[in-house]
Amino acid sequence: MKKHNFSAGPSILPQEVLLKASEAIMDFNNDGLSLLEISHRSKSFVDVMEKARSLALELLGLEGKGYKALFLQGGASTQFLMVALNLLEKRAAYLNTGTWSDKAVKEAKIYDDILEVASSKDAGYNYIPKGFDIPSDHDYLHITSNNTIFGTQMKTIPNSPIPLVCDMSSDIFSRTLDYSKFDLIYAGAQKNMGPAGTTLVIVKEDVLGNVSRKIPSMMDYKVHISKSSMFNTPPVFAVYTSMLTLEWLKNLGGIKAIEEVNEMKARVMYSEIDLNPLFKGYANKEDRSNMNATFTLANEDLKETFETMLKEAGISGLNGHRSIGGYRASMYNALPLDSVKALVEVMSELETKA
Ligand SMILES: *Cc1c(COP(=O)(O)O)cnc(C)c1O
């Protein structure tokens, strides 16, 4: 039986996407060949890449606004470095809201002494700092829109006088925003878009070409743009499956439609966390993520009973990140409302048992 999949990443994909992707492995486009055994330069695959790139821009409302979409490799973790290589000339500013931001800072520090405009590290990253100053003489501001591990999410995106770079790995395509506020967005596919193996980068072309260093070709956004995201062999399966998910989202009504479902799921989840005395939310209420809900059991003695009940209900992937423990319900786009209801049911049943 299919489980309720709350995994933080790699994570749930729509059933119809999994079905189409598996069919393409056996026979792609009824060509008598697998997607995995054709040239990435074949028309069939070039069409896939172009469709994936244009759907990404279309869904975010960024078509015709000077942006390019790329499907690269090396995960979001490579972007920590690539952003600095391509944009950091003198000094950059970073907002430190979690483990991933911290890692981004560490990579950028290879090139320069980075300014942290604010950090919530002192409070175990359970909130989003607000009201910080953004220095106008820095090369860019880097933010992380959703903190997958701690379960916080930036509800408002700052108006930045300098180029705005965002790690959007765990909430891209989940909510309506003015995406033109960003100059560079990156996201590993495996949270809210597809399988592991590719990273979507959306970049406004006019922020490129302003650094004096030599950039290795594989690390150079301009090289990837000039080769239409085919500078080297792309991860064909990850790009194809991401394209299928983007098509699924478009057919559903796009970001606006999925945002309503995501808000509903978050309401159901957080109201149980708040009303049930056996559970305690981790993140500051106003900064709670609609994607990753983090919580703990108030009474550790109930751990075994709770986890047995979860197992019996077919609920999977609820363990918190190893660095903070507790529980984390990841409610990405493909997770149905019914899965959240199933989880909430187990939580309230536990209350009657306790
Ligand atoms: C998962 C995650 C990453 C790391 O992604 P990789 O693809 O494993 O490098 C970076 N940032 C955020 C916000 C994430 O959720």
Image (cartoon, grey):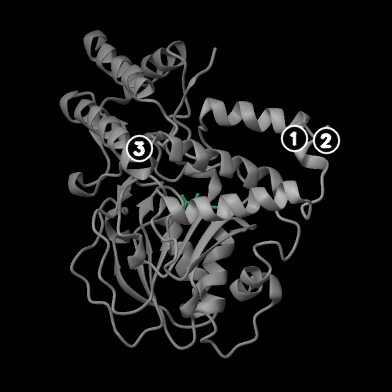
On the image, the x and y values in percent for residue 351 come to 23, 15
What's the amino acid at mark 1?
Phe
Marks 3/2 in contact by CB < 8 Å: the verdict is no
Residue 331 falls in which quadrant of the image?
top left
Label drawn at residue 148:
none
Marks 1/2 in contact by CB < 8 Å: the verdict is yes
Label drawn at residue 33:
2
Q: Secondary structure at mark 3?
A: helix
Which quadrant does the C terminus fall into?
top left
On the image, the x and y values in percent for residue 277 come to 18, 24
Q: Residues within 10 Å of mark 3 (few under 14, many from 20)?
A: many
Q: Is residue 16 above or below residue 64?
A: above
What's the amino acid at mark 2?
Leu
Q: Secondary structure at mark 1?
A: helix
Left or right position of 304 against 136: right
Q: Residue at x 30, y 50 (%)?
A: 176
Q: Residue at x 27, y 55 (%)?
A: 123
Structural distance between the alpha carbons of marks 1 and 2: 6 Å
Q: Secondary structure at mark 2?
A: loop
On the image, the x and y values in percent for residue 301 come to 32, 20
Residue 332 falls in which quadrant of the image?
top left
Left or right position of 284 against 58: left
The one of 286 and 159 positioned closer to us in this rendering: 159
Which label lies toward us, 3 or 2? 2
Which quadrant does the N terminus fall into?
top right
| Residue hosting label 3 | 258
Q: Is residue 99 above or below residue 226?
A: above
Left or right position of 197 against 309: right
